[in-house]
Image: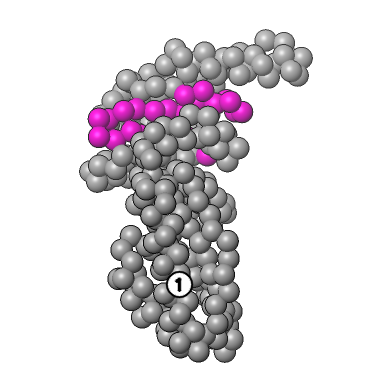
Amino acid sequence: MEIICVGNELLIGKTLNTNAQWLAKQATDLGITVKRITVVADEVDEIANAVREALKRKPQFIITTGGLGPTFDDKTLEGVAKALNRKLEINPEALQMVKERYEAYAKERRIGKVELTQPRIKMATIPEKTEAIANPVGTAPAVSVNLKKTILIALPGVPAEMEAIFKATIAPLLKQASSSNAFYEKSIYADNIMESTLAPLIDKVMHDNRGVYIKSHPKGEENKPHMEIHFSTTAENAEKPQETLQKAIAQLSSLIEENGGKTIRDKQTTHE
């Protein structure tokens, strides 16, 4: 799976890219491996190029976030259309979704009839031969298209909207695609051992325990090292991965202690 985040605000550092972190975590927990996260500007050619490049790698899923709103800089669907060599068109289902949302707003605020202006119609203008996905908390529909080897999904950039659509529609799709995969992770902590000393120990344990990924995260200072060591694995069998993870943890803990360090265990997390 690949994630493409669209927005100048991300590139200039104005907005923290929490969408990418959230999506990556959700996908990983569902047993889907995220291979790449790309951030591009609100420019049609940049978006189109990013989508084309991702499609060449043939990931099972590409999820974009941002750029589906009514303003001039919301250009994601125009970029997707260009990448797919398809025209933009007003989608009747998407238009109905937008209309119903604005009618609900009008009723709630008692402001009378709301006109479908051009900016509002823009949110229902999507690439031809694509599917509109209802937005349960916002106005702009998401968009999905099955390209045989890759399913491309465009989600809004507003976190609450993106998360609501993902949970309602996308998560079940990813779970089905991951089959019976389960993601397992556990962290331990090590004191009194520098990362340079820890590195070859991690290499050995990863070599001896295929399928287990180990990453060290320094939390202390150079003269007072404190490390979080994160173990993870994804597999189909619900029992063997746990045993493999525990074996790797025991082996590394022993090696750390042999090298003058001290380990502290933490709880395990499993996602099935």
153 inside magenta stretch = yes
Q: Determine the residue positioned at 46% across, 44% down.
A: 272
Left or right of 133: which side holds 189?
right
Q: Position of residue 155 (x, y in %)?
A: 47, 35
Say if 105 sits above or below 205 in the image. above
Residue 246 appears in the rendering: yes
Q: Residue furthest top?
A: 113
Say if 152 sits above or below 99 in the image. below
194 inside magenta stretch = no
Query: How many numbered circles are shown?
Result: 1
Q: Position of residue 253 (x, y in %)?
A: 47, 76
Say if 35 sits above or below 68 in the image. below
Count residues near mark 1 (Cα–Cα under 10 Å), then give few for <14, some for 14-19, many for 20+: few
Q: Which residue matches tag 1?
A: 250
Say if 125 sits above or below 78 in the image. above
Q: Say what amino acid the circle numbered 1 marks.
A: Ala
Residue 40 appears in the rendering: no
| SS type, badge 1 | helix
Q: Residue furthest right?
A: 110
Q: Position of residue 236 (x, y in %)?
A: 36, 46
Q: Position of residue 56 (x, y in %)?
A: 23, 43
Q: Determine the residue positioned at 53% across, 17% down.
A: 97
Q: Name the residue nearer the viewer: 253 or 26.
A: 253
Q: Determine the residue positioned at 57% across, 70% down.
A: 265
Q: Name the residue nearer the viewer: 59 or 181.
A: 181
